[in-house]
Amino acid sequence: MREFAERTLVPIITRDMERLIYTLCGIKKPRRILEIGTAIGYSAICYGFAAPEAEITTIEVRERSVYKARANIEEAGLKDRINVIHGKAEEILPDIEGYFDIIFIDAAKGQYRKFFDLCEKNMTHDTLIISDNVLYKGMPCDDSFIDERRNKTISRRMKDYLSFLSEDPRFETSLLAIGDGVALSYFK
């Protein structure tokens, strides 16, 4: 899958992020995981193997990716535990019920705060929120080199999201220099 992703430029988690998933699942032993941003199913499959008792719900907007993810998940033998939902996360999340042990946000970078807010009803004090790519290509650190308006918007929104996670007294957040930056958060 990694070779396919690299060849076709499909974004998937980095190898060090994959190791972090295994470590966190080994510690946390999650029973329910919510993923926002499936792509071809690579990270969902990682969660499936790292948390063998977990039920995983993952959301993907691109229809073509949904088909590829479902095929990859079936090939990995995990179709009974991983449910791929096709659609826009902002439309699906309000209908997602119950609490999750881990919520993994790895979709449209400029929408992380919206996704987080929509998932808040699915969080308890034990929920671990993992936000991947929060240092998106270094843009939130220094956007002076950005020339595209879209990327400036992503950079600004990611800065706002990181400020929210760091400053909201309800959450404890650590930022890790893994992959393209990872934020780990939970309710205090």
Image (cartoon, grey):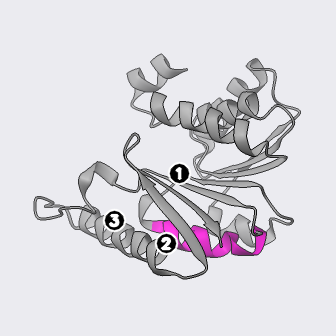
Q: Earlier in the sequence, mark 3 or mark 2?
A: 3
169, above or below 108, in the image: below
Identify the residue shown where x is 71% and y is 67%. Answer: 93
For disc 2, the marked residue is: 165
Q: Nearer the viewer, residue 25 or 153?
A: 25
In the displayed structure image, the side of residue 144 where residue 58 appears, left or right: right
Give amino acid for label 3.
Ile
The image shows residue 152 at horizontal and vertical percentages of: 24, 67
Mark number displayed over residue 162? none
Q: Earlier in the sequence, mark 1 or mark 2?
A: 1
Q: Nearer the viewer, mark 1 or mark 2?
A: 2
Would you call the spot at circle 2 few (<14 residues within 10 Å), some (14-19), or many (20 or more)? many
Mark number displayed over residue 106? 1
Give amino acid for label 1.
Asp
Can you say which quadrant of the picture contains the C terminus? Answer: bottom right
Q: Is mark 3 in CB contact (under 8 Å) with mark 1?
A: no
36, above or below 82, in the image: below
The image shows residue 150 at horizontal and vertical percentages of: 28, 64
Q: Nearer the viewer, residue 43 or 147?
A: 43
Give amino acid for label 2.
Leu
For the residue labelled by badge 1, is the local secondary structure a helix, a strand or a loop?
A: loop
Can you say which quadrant of the picture contains the N terminus? Answer: top right
Cα gap from disc 3 to disc 1, whole angstroms: 14 Å
For disc 3, the marked residue is: 154
Q: Quadrant of residue 29?
A: top right
Residues in magenta, as a range: 111-123
Q: Is residue 117 magenta?
A: yes
